[in-house]
Image (tube, rainbow, N blue to C red):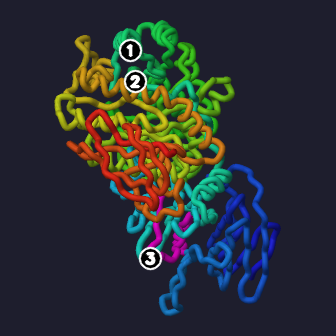
Amino acid sequence: MITIEKGAVVLRRGNETVRVEAWGGGLRVRAVPSGAIPDEPWALDTKVEPEEVEILRGNPVTSIRCGKIRCDILDGHLAFYNEDRLLTQEMWFPWSLRDTARKYKLRLGGEGFEAEVRFEAYDGESLHGMGQYRGCKYELKGERLEMSQRNSQISVPFVISSRGYGLLWNNPAVGHAVFGTNETSFQADSTRKIDYWITADENPMRIIEKYTDVIGHPSPLPESLLGLWQCKLRYRTQDEVLEVAREYKRRGITPNVIVIDYFHWIYQGDWDFDPDFWPDPKAMVDELASMGIRTMVSIWPTFDPRSRNYRDFAERGYLLLADRGLQIDFDFNGYNRVLDSTNPEARRHAYELMKTNYGKYGIDMFWLDEAEPEISVCDYDHYRYWLGSASEVGNIYPRLHSKMVYDGQKEDGVHDILNLVRSAWVGSSRYGALVWSGDVESSFREMKVQVANGINMGLAGIPYWISDTGGFYGGNVNDPVFRELLVRWYQWACYCPVLRMHGDRQPSLGTLTHNTDRGGGFCPSGAPNEIWSYGEDMYEIFVKYLSIREDMKPYIKKTADEAVDTGAPMIRAMFLEFPEDEVCRTLGDQYMFGHDYLVAPVTDYGARERRVYLPAGSWQCTAGGEVTASRGEYVTVPAPLDYMPVFLRV
């Protein structure tokens, strides 16, 4: 049975209800196996008016059109078109298979169920987006992706197809997506509804715009934070931080930010400085501010039972709950429990603690590490949030964790909000989130993956994305391979939203001479990681690229503002700028930095030249010389150690 409502078609077949509704510049599809459809908006919580809507009730086909996308409904089957061109459709099954495109597996005695939607797969279809996956290629066709948040894995379930559509799986449940040769499917382990949104346009940039309109536009990227961020694992004392800042000042360089990493506290959950190693934080922050440097501190959402705030948060019910067994979520330098950032009261209480303990020193930038959150054993059905089980809602955690700080800072009138966060979900960019890729390996192999990940993150709706320059772990400062890797990664980082030095450099410095069994004296620190730490030859390259970065600040800010206006990522897939060029669909090792700059990172050890694809047009190589590509062509350009190939569109 089909009924027509304002802007929607509702289909009832037996106990199942399916609602297809005009939503912004696309169609939202929701379905349940029985009962009423739950109201949770999840990522679609921004109110937008639908584009022009047309509903035609026919026999046997009923159709609903919103803007350029149309859904035809025939015998419970959904097919999506742009005009008369088929974009995608739910899978057809012959009666003999006794199968269906929308599948539900009910849980006995409970409200949640496993759900899956399967779509037809098409030869030659190219798929991109979905966030960041360490073992995944730039082209998603042929991939199976776990939709869950882990350290260095970020699930943002929006995919763009070369067939001219974009699809958002609007569901924070843990599950998986399959982009096979025989089907495309999305599956949730535990949910209360099927919920997805789909849009269409011939121009993929316009798909991004429509997607941004329904999930919310990014917050601005502050111009004051577009220079160098200095960071390492880890500055152990107040004196270390000030010595680094003073040395930068002596060299005539002003980092925009210096970051103080973990265990500047005593126990996880203290969210304050260990006075043994940070005796006067206010004086430190004031001196840094006098040099034009903002201070950022690392906050983990973890609470050690020995910390001074554990009892307060536990008694208020503000911590992640284990459904069975011991209440232990994370094991690192002691057993810990995790802040429940899905609880609005917990978010408010946590932000007030951050403001009390750090704001009094003048600190208003936070590194939201562990924001997946990281749990020691990823058995998601074992944990429960205020919003529901981790299996059902877990993927939304990092977005709400960023929202916690952003909402508090907006209310407090903080200027230039930007917080570093280790994970994201759909819409995270609304909340001052500079997302970084987590603890990745220091290797050329990993750098290749990170370049592709940055492009796919942008396509998934995360325009402000970076990685640890040089990778996080395994980088020995005396290894010539690592030293070359660091140069190449730094050159690439200069053409990313933020330039940030970070990593756990080897050999370790060990613990302090005045060692303690807790806090700052308990954790070791990596080798020095400042731009002068690697010798004069590398220092000259770092300074050269820092100068390039400084000169580009107006352009970078302009590109960031485009992200705010339209959602266009700063790290742009080539096909966003050149949608008619089929080769650009295949390029996961080069990208456009905004509209004008074609960036080709060097990701092979010992490489001194680079093959670059130039779409049709005129290009100015930043090393000198102009190339005109009449039809699009590959060129091989020199890439000495002090240069990464970049072309300017002219």
Provide the residue span drawn in magenta: 103-131
The residue tagged 2 is 230
Residue at 44% from the left image edge and 76% from the top image edge: 123
CA–CA distance in space, label 3 to label 2: 47 Å
Type of amino acid under label 1: Tyr
User: In the displayed structure, does residue 613 sit left or right of residue 574?
Assistant: left
Type of amino acid under label 2: Gln
Residue at 50% from the left image edge and 46% from the top image edge: 649
Tag 3, which secondary structure?
Answer: loop
Would you place residue 374 above or below residue 212 in this image? above
> Where does the N terminus fall, quadrant-wise?
bottom right
Type of amino acid under label 3: Asp
| Mark number displayed over residue 248 | 1
The residue tagged 3 is 123
Q: Residues within 10 Å of mark 3 (few under 14, many from 20)?
A: few
Residue at 39% from the left image edge and 51% from the top image edge: 452
Please state the horizontal and vertical placement of residue 418, each as a whole percent of the image. 55, 31
Q: Nearer the viewer, residue 465 or 348?
A: 465
Please state the horizontal and vertical placement of residue 316, each as a whole percent of the image. 58, 33
